[in-house]
Amino acid sequence: MTPPEPEDNDILRAENIVKRFGALTALDGVTLHLRKGEVLGLIGDNGAGKSTLIKIITGYHRPDSGTLSIEGQDVQLKSVSQARGLGIETVFQDLALVNELSVFHNMFLNSEVTFKPLPFLNNREMKKRTRKYLEDMGVKIQSIDVEVAQLSGGQRQAIAVARSVYSDAKILLLDEPLAAMGAKEGAMILDLVQRLKEKREVSIILIAHNYAQVLEVCDRVNLLQHGKIAYDEKASSTSIEELTELVVAEYRKARETA
Amino acid sequence: MAKQATDEISTADRVDAGGPRTDGVARLATALWRRREASIALVAILLLLYFQSSNDAFLSQGNIRGLAQSGYATAIIACGLVMLLICGEIDLSVGSVMGFAPIIVYLADQEFVFPIAVVVALLVTSLVGLLNGVITVYLRVPSFVTTLGTLFLLTGLNVTLTDGFPKPAPEESGLTRILGGGAFSGIAWALIIVVLMHLLLTRTRWGLHTFAVGGNLVGASEAGVRVNRVKIGNFMLCSALGGFAGIMEAIRINSVDPLAGGPNVMFLAVSAAVIGGTALAGGAGTIIGAFFGTAVLAILRNGFTLQGVSANTFNIILGISILVAMTLNVYVGRLRRSGKT
């Protein structure tokens, strides 16, 4: 497939990203563009390299070659905190929540509010903001004082998303937020993404397996296969059938050559 | 137990939320139920009452001084161990660091003035913590093994550096009087350190990150917490506290003993931490609980000694008490958790 043309309103461009782990080539020249305010669905089978790509964009891994640029500026990400400083926030599959800590401490993990210049935690302020954030996002939780261990999977996901959104994210990466989620909870997360999309303040890359859900909220879909972007189309110009056919065709081809 | 972390910070609010009519007894009961420190504190008080009723000498001034002097070093070391245990590590070498620090003071005292020698000793003990931390974090050797190594290393070094003979304690000065010269200076320092460490653990980012690292290492690092720094920092803190306790102990007994400290005091401190509610698996624990845990152990030993129980029998009783306390803690913790949801 020919790589997409750069556009003026690209907030993120990954060009020709290659990443190898020993003999395994996880990413083999990925070119992906994210436009400002859009929700981009990233699909692909297990092992296609989705998580590796996300971890490169978030500064967790460094690419072997290729470039990343944010708002037209080339960047070399060396750490997760550097990427975060540039407005890239991720909700990982494991959510990066600490079960033993309360909702509001998780909400502010590593960006805690303190009584500056004193180093003490300002719990009251963190609770206040947590309540407001969750309310804005339409997330209902019994109490923000409880440990996150006591929350449902959907609530935990919502907290992780809210945490990312409210830490001044420009680019939000959602790594399979819908996996292991019941129908009702999945709908709650999709609602959340829809709400963020309407505001258009944050650009989102959503990784998911369920094509129906991807087409429901995404503006555009990219299919990752064997470490390359194999398909790039507007959500309105494609269908579940087409996406399924692409993946299945690839599977058949792989089986025949095997 | 997972509860502690948030409890530390928010129990007060939650208990208050019971409404203005909540009566005092109910509040006390709730507080006892919610906070593990409260239950271990209650055990300490009950033991005090029991030993006092069986022997009037127990709460005499002389015996209180004895209690304070036998427990303060363990209490200080337990603070450092609580931090390490919460972030999922352990330091078995801290008892040997306790013996190591006064030897460094003795050696440095020959070159510098005494206050500088103390600073040098604290720096050197922090370096031991740095070594423990770096080997554990970067070379991925489990801290149990790393610190077992430094335990033997320092035990040997302590004897080698002194040729196996006790050395004279630092000459008396204003600073030595503050650091353990007075009858109650040890316990006063222990209380100050307990308060400061409690604030560090429950009211600062460092403390919150310590919980996060022990609770979910990968998650904390994905959230951007510098997990290696937190762990290494706590190793250094633990060693420095061990060194500080060791210097005070040398001043108190007026001798730099190459065999001071050692695994016994370390294991007592670990027991105190665990009896006080710190999870060996990480993610939960309290400084105050460890302090009361130390108090319980010191009261048990002192009380049984007053009753004429021999040291050998005492260890049997201590062992049983620890097993009972741990079992109760696990059991009550489970009850508490199931009752909450």
Image (spheres, coloured by chain):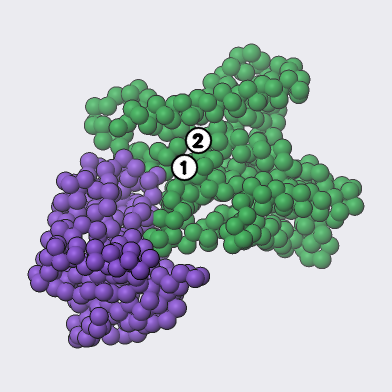
Disc 2 is attached to a residue of which chain?
B
Categorize mark 2 by other alpha carbons within 10 Å: few (<14), some (14-19), many (20+). many
Image colour for chain A is purple
Residue B327 badge: none
Identity of the amino acid at label 1?
Ala
What amino acid type is highlighted by mark number 2?
Gly
Q: Residue furthest front?
A: A256
Write down the colour of chain B. green
Query: How many callouts does the rendering have?
Result: 2
Q: CA distance from mark 1 to mark 2?
A: 8 Å
Residue B338 showing in the rendered view: yes
Q: Position of residue B1 (x, y in %)?
A: 45, 37
Horizontal side of residue B281 vs B93, given as left or right = left
Q: Nearer the viewer, residue B2 or A234?
A: A234
For residue A164, above or below residue A233: above
- Whether tag 1 and tag 2 are in contact, CB under 8 A, the answer is yes
Q: Residue at image x 55%, y 36%? A: B274
User: Along the horizontal axis of the image, is A19 left or right of B312?
Assistant: left
Asked which secondary structure carries label 1, the reply is loop
Q: Disc 2 marks which residue?
A: B277
Q: Which mark is residue B284?
A: 1
The earlier-in-sequence mark between 1 and 2 is: 2
Of residues A22 and A73, which is closer to you in this image? Answer: A22
Residue B140 percent across, percent down from the top left: 59, 57
The N terminus of chain A appears in which quarter of the rendering? bottom left
Q: Is residue A121 above or below residue A13?
A: above
Which residue occupies the extreme left position in the image? A236
Q: From the top left corner, tell me how far across and down residue A49 is, in percent.
A: 35, 67
Quadrant position of the C terminus of chain A in the picture? bottom left
Residue situated in front as seen by the camera: B23 or A175: A175
Can residue A130 be seen in this snapshot?
no
Q: Residue at x 72, y 41 (%)?
A: B263
